[in-house]
């Protein structure tokens, strides 16, 4: 955050004004920390969770909104963990040990000094140097030491990296790959100003060397520039960059959704990168819970981000994804697509699990498991499929299914069966 125009902290100075899009990001960060802890503590046999939360561009931790003051990401993450610990203490008679370490990084010395002062004022001062560590470095320089410290905590390496960079090149893809390869269970939430990258490609006088930080070579750049001859070229470039990010970072699962800043036409990704489909699912649910803040440029169902260069890439776009209208469209699209997917993969002898349906397609879609569940239930109620639990018991009435529940086709589809129609 040290490079950001408009965000500056000095002890005794005027607080920076928090933009609406930044407030939305902070809400996602706080909610995701809570959802993450909730997911990993559902097993009541578990008594302890080791977690490291890294804020790689932390800033001073305090903003103004009009005449009020509000917390920034460092304090919202601290509070999210405190709230989770309180809930666990209430729910667990034998207690629960939530061992969270916090790492706050900023290359601007004034910002770290301001954050340290705020931590002291808020009663966290005694924890600095213990479970709260401050780095007055750029994130790239601090990262090796952070990874080493996480590795010393045990084998699980549970860690969340919030990398709220200003543009698109402060964090190299090589660094993200290192995080993904050296830690067992990391997750990276990365902001990426894709519009700035598109503008760079449009400026013939720009120095393209910065593109090497995100692993684009000369031929890649030529291909991107050539895309400007296509209809809907801007979205086509964005889709290509998004695919490149997934391939270059080593993340198996991701959510490529846009923050929609008020009074701005910038396209601004909030990318969630992880190794497990459940992580992707939890982040997807948060996007649906925060309406009219995020957008998804693609279709409403599975494989929705595949673009045809000959078509208008905005056709079928979800205008305001993650609202009620988008959900209805997503449910309709999934109901249309599921029969074809099931007919190609499942039969009476070889059923398919919900996990297999979801995992193979979750990255390119705004769909979450709840939407898949509702449409599986529709097909079951129409007697097109039967669903069994891992124990072999038929799921006759439930509307929520486990990842390992099995879907089987009926032996004889009904006369007007969606499955019969799709198979024809």
Image: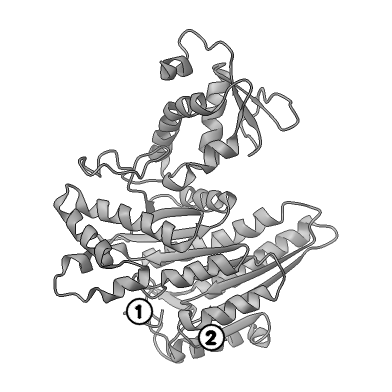
Using the image as rendered, state which of residue 180 and residue 42 is in the foreground. Answer: 180
Q: Nearer the viewer, mark 1 or mark 2?
A: 2
Q: CA distance from mark 1 to mark 2?
A: 17 Å
Identify the coloring.
one colour
In the figure, 392 relative to 71: above or below? above
Q: Secondary structure at mark 1?
A: loop
Counting from the top left corner in percent of width and height, residue 246 is at: 43, 57
Indicate whether 243 appears above or below 369.
below
Can residue 59 be seen here? The reply is: no
| Left or right of 297 in this view: 93 | right
Crowding at dot 1, Cα within 10 Å, few <14 / some 14-19 / many 20+, comes out as few
Element carrying mark 2: strand
Which residue was labeled with disc 2?
Answer: 135
Image vertical order of residue 268 relative to residue 318, above or below? below
Quick one: label 1 or label 2, which is nearer the N terminus?
Answer: 1
Task: Choose top left, top right, bottom left or bottom right for residue 405.
Answer: top right
Residue 224 lies, in percent from the top left, at 23, 59
Rate crowding at label 2 as few (under 14), some (14 to 19) or many (20 or more) other CA atoms within 10 Å: many
Percent x, y of residue 377: 57, 26
Residue furthest out toward the right = 94
């Amino acid at each position: 955050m040290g490079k950001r125009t408009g965000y500056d902290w000095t002890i005794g100075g005027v607080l920076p004004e928090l933009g609406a899009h930044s407030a939305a990001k902070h809400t996602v960060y706080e909610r995701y920390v809570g959802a993450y802890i909730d997911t990993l503590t559902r097993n009541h046999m578990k008594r302890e969770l080791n977690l490291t939360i890294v804020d790689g561009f932390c800033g001073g931790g305090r903003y103004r909104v009009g005449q009020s003051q509000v917390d920034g990401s460092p304090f919202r993450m601290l509070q999210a963990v405190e709230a989770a610990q309180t809930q666990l203490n209430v729910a667990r008679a034998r207690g629960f040990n939530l061992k969270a370490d916090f790492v706050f990084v900023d290359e601007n010395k004034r910002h770290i000094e301001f954050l340290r002062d705020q931590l002291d004022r808020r009663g966290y001062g005694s924890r600095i140097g213990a479970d709260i560590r401050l780095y007055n470095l750029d994130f790239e320089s601090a990262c090796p030491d952070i990874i080493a410290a996480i590795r010393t905590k045990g084998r699980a390496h549970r860690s969340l990296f919030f990398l709220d960079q200003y543009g698109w090149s402060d964090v190299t893809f090589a660094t993200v790959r290192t995080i993904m390869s050296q830690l067992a269970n990391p997750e990276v939430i990365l902001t990426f100003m894709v519009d700035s990258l598109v503008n760079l490609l449009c400026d013939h006088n720009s120095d393209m060397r910065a593109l090497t930080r995100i692993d684009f070579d000369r031929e890649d750049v030529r291909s991107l520039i050539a895309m400007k001859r296509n209809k809907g070229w801007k979205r086509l470039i964005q889709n290509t960059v998004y695919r490149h990010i997934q391939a270059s970072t080593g993340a198996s699962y991701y959510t490529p959704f846009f923050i929609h800043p008020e009074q701005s036409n910038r396209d601004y990704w909030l990318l969630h990168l992880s190794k497990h489909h459940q992580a992707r699912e939890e982040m997807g649910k948060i996007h649906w819970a925060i309406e009219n803040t995020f957008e998804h440029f693609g279709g409403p169902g599975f494989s929705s981000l595949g673009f045809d260069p000959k078509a208008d890439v905005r056709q079928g776009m979800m205008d305001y994804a993650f609202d009620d209208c988008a959900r209805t469209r997503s449910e309709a699209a999934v109901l249309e697509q599921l029969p074809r997917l099931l007919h190609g993969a499942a039969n009476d002898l070889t059923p398919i699990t919900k996990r297999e349906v979801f995992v193979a397609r979750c990255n390119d879609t705004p769909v979450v498991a709840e939407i898949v569940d509702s449409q599986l239930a529709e097909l079951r109620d129409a007697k097109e499929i039967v669903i069994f639990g891992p124990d072999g018991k038929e799921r006759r009435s439930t509307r929520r299914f486990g990842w390992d529940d099995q879907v089987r086709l009926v032996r004889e589809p009904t006369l007007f069966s969606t499955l019969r129609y799709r198979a024809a």
